[in-house]
Image: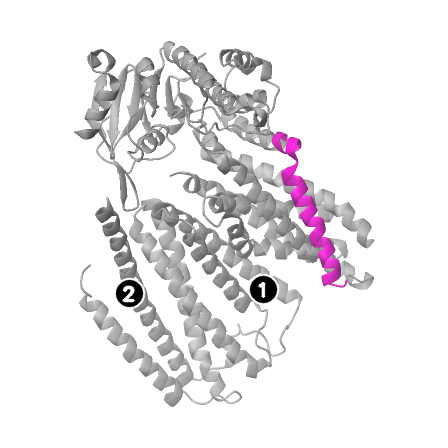
């Protein structure tokens, strides 16, 4: 196991710095929103987490397919890392969305397309992890996991679309419009800046965590290898 | 070479069988006999190395290999809710066997199950199931046959019947590879004996060369060495 | 007694193999009737439970019926999918299928078609019973179409996922967990389209749902068929 490469060390420092920077921007720099005041600030983290979750989802689907083609197990480690991290980020996004929704619309949950699809995505992740748990052979585990992430990845856009169509037929589940309408929030430039800064921050955090998780996966594989070799 | 994750089951096997040979693959449990046979049967792929059966490479030409391969394992691979006849018909269709009807009659005669052809396989004894399994395996007249511990769980009478069948089957010029624990039986049937231990072939001898020493001695020596 | 010595089988062998698998599943099921009776009894029980869980008063019935039906089908379907694959795996018969000189996808189509057949049989049986119990006329061509389209999508993905689930330790429990998040578009679209037909809404309102169903069916049948090799090989 190689020692932590310099780039990774730089990344983790960068992540921490950026995170505090983001906090600063959100609380000190970004103006108070007219209607919602402090509650609105959660929005920055909510969107960033959701964005990163999406990123992880795409990474998982792509690396899964790459594994199927190359049969190289290192892609499976990346896929697993992406699924796990994405799971956490999406969860934070959903929870923060809930916390934001309550004072905004008076309800913890809305069955709108984005939130519901996010919840379904969480279920797919959990299902994937449960699937992996039930298989001993690492090669089969990687194959099945890749197949399932692929199937999941294909179904999610269709699910999103279906719910959207369902919504247009049932208009305005929640009076003030769905949480999807980003533009209609009329963000002022300082808010937009904060938003972008947060997005970048969380992307960096995502990459850092992914890298750490991949290293953990590689370490685990080495341990398994050593175990078998010693016992044989 | 074949590995399952970090575990290496077969290593560096060089195995060659000539047409018409009957090779008995011997070895203790866990040596990798079943793994090896499954690779030959195209059910599993080897991690490294080339596999070539009946002139076709695996896994690239797997379909061609399977058409010429008959496999009998210790599980009969039969559907209990179907009759003997229906089982054969199913496999006959899967293998696209020409003149299926008459071929089925032939095979049922050969394995001695013609009177029970309309009975559900569920009602068969283990010995009868194994006989039908062999029938299933020869239905498409394969060039190469693989047997994985076919005597497992059979009583004396069934074993004798199996002996007769195997002699018959082998006698028609087919190439056979069989794994077994039952050295006594195998001694009569095979033309060549290979010993597999811990994932590699440690000894191989032709029946002629076995000479004075009997198979048991040869086997023990091979494992000890 | 020699089969053709070419390395590739004729396409008719492919179709023949699919037919053989479907025939085999149906014949075996006709004898034992285990799978169908389990699915049917389960479906009827679910409908019964719904009666007490959701008060199916006359006024509400027409709105709730499509949902109740599809939830029932979805759950009963998992029973069928599980059993169908377990039969192969348990007696090692899967090896028998894998040894046959046909493309793996023949196994997929064969199993998927027989799974579809079982599901349709259960659905066709449940419909009249539901009609009688709740005094709703369910003999609607549109509804039957939706049931067909929905079942195709369900079994297309279900066969793929059950082939995976049956090879894990947690087999029976795992299939619904894997299947339901992915099958949501089918359920949603099927319920909406069903209620559209039952409520005699104009076709313009039903079309989007039918489109989703058809798109889903095509996409996932194609994907499952392409990916099936990876699920069965070792």
Residue C125 x/y as whole percent: 73, 43
Which quadrant does the N terminus of chain C fall into? Answer: top left
Quadrant of residue C100 within the rendered picture: top left
> Residue at the spot x=38%, y=17% of the render?
B143
Disc 1: which residue: A164
* Residue nearest the viewer, comparing B101 with C63: B101
> Residue at the spot x=50%, y=44% of the render?
C160
Q: In the picture shown, does residue A44 fall above or below C23?
A: below
Q: In the picture shown, does residue A129 fall above or below B82?
A: below
User: Residues in magenta?
Assistant: C27-55
Q: CA distance from mark 2 to mark 1?
A: 37 Å
* Residue C203 in view (yes/no): no
Q: In the picture shown, does residue C225 fall above or below B98?
A: below
Mark before the other along the chain sequence, 2 or 1: 1
Task: Work out whether disc 2 and disc 1 sit on a shared chain.
Answer: yes
Residue A212 circle label: 2
**Left or right: B139, with C22 as reference point:** left
* Residue nearest the viewer, comparing A143 with B121: B121
């Amino acid at each position: 196991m190689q020692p932590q490469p310099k780039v990774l060390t730089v990344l983790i420092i960068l992540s921490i710095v950026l995170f505090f920077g983001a906090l600063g921007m959100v609380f000190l720099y970004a103006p108070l929103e007219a209607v919602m005041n402090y509650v609105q600030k959660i929005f920055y983290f909510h969107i960033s987490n959701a964005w990163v979750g999406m990123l992880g989802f795409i990474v998982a689907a792509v690396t899964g397919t790459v594994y199927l083609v190359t049969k190289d197990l290192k892609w499976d480690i990346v896929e697993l890392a992406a699924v796990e991290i994405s799971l956490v980020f999406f969860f934070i996004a959903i929870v923060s969305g809930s916390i934001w929704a309550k004072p905004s619309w008076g309800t913890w949950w809305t069955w709108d397309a984005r939130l519901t699809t996010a919840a379904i995505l969480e279920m797919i992740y959990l299902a994937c992890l449960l699937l992996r748990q039930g298989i001993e052979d690492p090669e089969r585990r990687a194959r099945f996991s890749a197949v399932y992430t692929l199937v999941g990845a294909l179904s999610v856009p269709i699910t999103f679309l279906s719910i959207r169509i369902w919504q247009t037929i049932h208009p305005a589940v929640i009076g003030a419009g769905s949480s999807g309408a980003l533009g209609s929030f009329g963000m002022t430039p300082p808010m937009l800046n904060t938003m972008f800064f947060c997005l970048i921050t969380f992307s960096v955090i995502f990459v850092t965590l992914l890298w750490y998780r991949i290293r953990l996966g590689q370490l685990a594989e080495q341990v398994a290898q050593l175990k078998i070799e010693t016992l044989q | 070479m074949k590995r399952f994750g970090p575990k290496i089951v077969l290593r560096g096997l060089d195995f060659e069988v000539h047409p018409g040979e009957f090779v008995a693959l011997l070895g203790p449990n866990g040596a990798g006999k079943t793994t090896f046979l499954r690779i030959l049967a195209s059910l599993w792929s080897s991690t490294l190395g080339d596999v070539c059966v009946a002139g076709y490479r695996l896994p690239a030409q797997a379909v061609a290999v399977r058409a010429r391969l008959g496999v009998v394992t210790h599980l009969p691979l039969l559907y209990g809710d179907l009759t003997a006849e229906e089982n054969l018909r199913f496999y006959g269709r899967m293998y696209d066997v020409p003149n299926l009807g008459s071929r089925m009659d032939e095979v049922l005669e050969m394995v001695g199950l013609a009177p029970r052809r309309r009975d559900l396989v569920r009602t068969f004894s283990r010995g009868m199931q194994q006989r039908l399994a062999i029938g299933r395996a020869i239905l498409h007249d394969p060039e190469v046959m693989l047997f994985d511990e076919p005597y497992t769980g059979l009583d004396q009478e069934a074993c004798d019947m199996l002996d007769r069948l195997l002699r018959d089957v082998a006698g028609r010029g087919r190439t056979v590879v069989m794994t077994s624990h039952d050295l006594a039986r195998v001694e009569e049937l095979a033309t060549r004996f290979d010993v597999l231990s811990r994932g590699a072939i440690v000894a191989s001898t032709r029946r002629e060369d076995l000479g004075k020493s009997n198979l048991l001695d040869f086997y023990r020596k091979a494992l000890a060495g | 007694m020699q089969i053709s010595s070419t390395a590739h089988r004729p396409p008719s062998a492919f179709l023949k193999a699919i037919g053989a698998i479907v025939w085999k599943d149906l014949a075996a099921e006709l004898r034992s009737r285990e799978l169908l009776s389990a699915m049917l009894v389960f479906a009827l029980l679910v409908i019964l439970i719904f009666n007490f869980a959701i008060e199916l008063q006359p006024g509400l019935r027409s709105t709730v019926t499509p949902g109740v039906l599809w939830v029932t089908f979805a759950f009963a379907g998992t029973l069928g999918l599980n059993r169908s694959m377990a039969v192969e795996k348990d007696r090692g018969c899967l090896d028998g299928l894998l040894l046959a000189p046909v493309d793996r996808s023949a196994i997929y189509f064969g199993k998927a078609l027989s799974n579809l057949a079982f599901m349709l049989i259960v659905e066709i049986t449940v419909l009249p019973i539901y009609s009688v119990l709740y005094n709703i006329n369910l003999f609607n061509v549109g509804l039957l179409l939706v049931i067909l389209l929905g079942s195709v999508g369900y079994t297309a993905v279900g066969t793929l996922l059950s082939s995976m689930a049956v090879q894990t330790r947690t087999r029976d429990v795992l299939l619904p967990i894997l299947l339901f998040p992915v099958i949501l578009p089918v359920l949603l679209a099927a319920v909406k389209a069903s209620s559209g037909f039952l409520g005699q809404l104009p076709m313009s309102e039903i079309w989007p749902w039918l489109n989703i169903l058809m798109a889903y069916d095509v996409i996932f049948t194609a994907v499952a068929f392409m990916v099936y090799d990876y699920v069965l090989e070792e």
